[in-house]
Image (tube, rainbow, N blue to C red):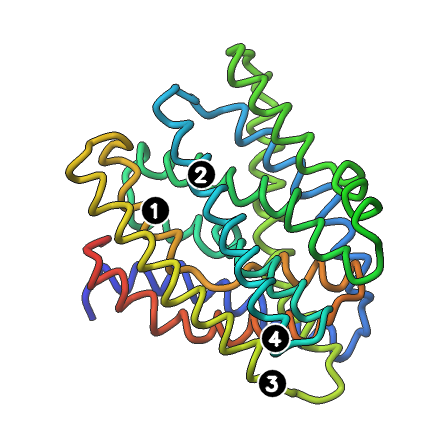
Amino acid sequence: MDPFYTNLLEQLLPLYAIAFLGYIVGKFARIDIKSITTLTIFVISPSVFVLSIAKLDFAAGAIIVPLMMFALACLFSLIALKISKFYMDDKTSYLAALATGTSNWGYFGVPIAFALFPPEMVAAYIITGVSFQIYENSLGLYFISRGHKDPWQSFLTIFKYPVIYAIILGLALSAFHIELPSIANNILGLFKGAYTVLGMMIIGLGLSQMEKFSIDIKFIATMFAVRFVMWPLIALAIVATDQHLHILGDDFHKPILLFSIVPMAANNIAFASHFDMNPAKAAMGVLLTTVFALVYIPLAIKLLGLG
């Protein structure tokens, strides 16, 4: 086998193994997924992002890409919410709105970025990922809470979750060039491992709590269309345009393309479970897009010239 694909599989297969382990443990140990998702949302994710972002060099030229991707995530989610209400119930529509503006760029995509890109492109990939975290913890959080709350209550919910504050703190530390003590690197390494393991395990835990495997064809079809058709087309258009305008910079082209081909975010399960918004549908969507990604991503990497 081509060494490149061997290396890529070495990065991907452990992620699938962790998700499968989560399913086995969830089936036989009856672990409460809400406790795991609460730990991930309130402790693990904020710690990873504040420490990671503080280490990045946020030059002015690097700000436009996260802003652009954040705007696209908001646009995709609003369109999905509007259209899906014609063929989905309200809860599923709000779940679809959250899911279309997010992706598994962190738990799933970061190991691939390290396998594919030089350090400067990995940094560009992480910088771009900030936009998805801001979306997920602002408009995405608003949408997923709308199944049980009125618009004002859902708006206030945004300010009760810590990731957005962690991102702001990380940006402030980076902007003012405040260096963290060396022990922060050790803490970051520990939390990054927990972030990936718990994030992928949530997929298995979510599936383990399904009494029977059922597929909402309309929801799944929407997720596949958005994640594997619409996002890649938009990313290709952005890169093709910038190759003529030279605004974003070459270091961002491949990271943007990688962002466009990763599967549904595992955090969709965490938020759906936390807010009781069809977590079984979220888990099935994440499972199917993640399984499909095992074949799709190597092909897409080859076609897009990311390797």
Instruction: Give amino acid for label 3.
Output: Ile
Spot occupied by residue 258 in the image (x, y as percentages of width and height): 35, 52
Secondary-structure class at tag 2: helix
For marks 4 and 2, give the one nearer the viewer: 4
Q: Which residue is mark 4?
A: 86
Q: Which residue is mark 3?
A: 215
Give the distance between the C-alpha atoms of the residues marked 4 and 2, in whole angstroms. Answer: 36 Å
Which residue lies at the image location 42% right of the left edge and 51% below the top edge?
Answer: 111
Q: Which residue is mark 1?
A: 256
Which residue lies at the image location 39% right of the left edge and 58% below the top edge?
Answer: 231
> Which is nearer the N-term, disc 2 or disc 1?
2
Instruction: Give amino acid for label 1.
Output: Ile
Spot occupied by residue 224 in the image (x, y as percentages of width and height): 45, 72
Give the distance between the C-alpha atoms of the residues marked 2 and 1, in whole angstroms. Answer: 10 Å
Instruction: Report the disc number at residue 126.
Output: 2
Secondary-structure class at tag 1: helix
> Which is nearer the N-term, disc 1 or disc 4?
4
Instruction: Give amino acid for label 2.
Output: Ile
Which residue lies at the image location 50% right of the left edge and 69% below the top edge?
Answer: 16
> Which is nearer the N-term, disc 3 or disc 1?
3
Instruction: Note whether 64 is above or below 257 in the view shown.
Output: above
Residue at the left extreme of this rendering? 244
Res 87 quadrant in image: bottom right
> Which is nearer the N-term, disc 4 or disc 2?
4
Instruction: Note whether 147 is above or below 57 in the view shown.
Output: below
Res 273 quadrant in image: bottom right
Give the distance between the C-alpha atoms of the residues marked 3 and 1, in whole angstroms. Answer: 30 Å
Secondary-structure class at tag 3: loop
Tell how many labels: 4
Secondary-structure class at tag 4: loop
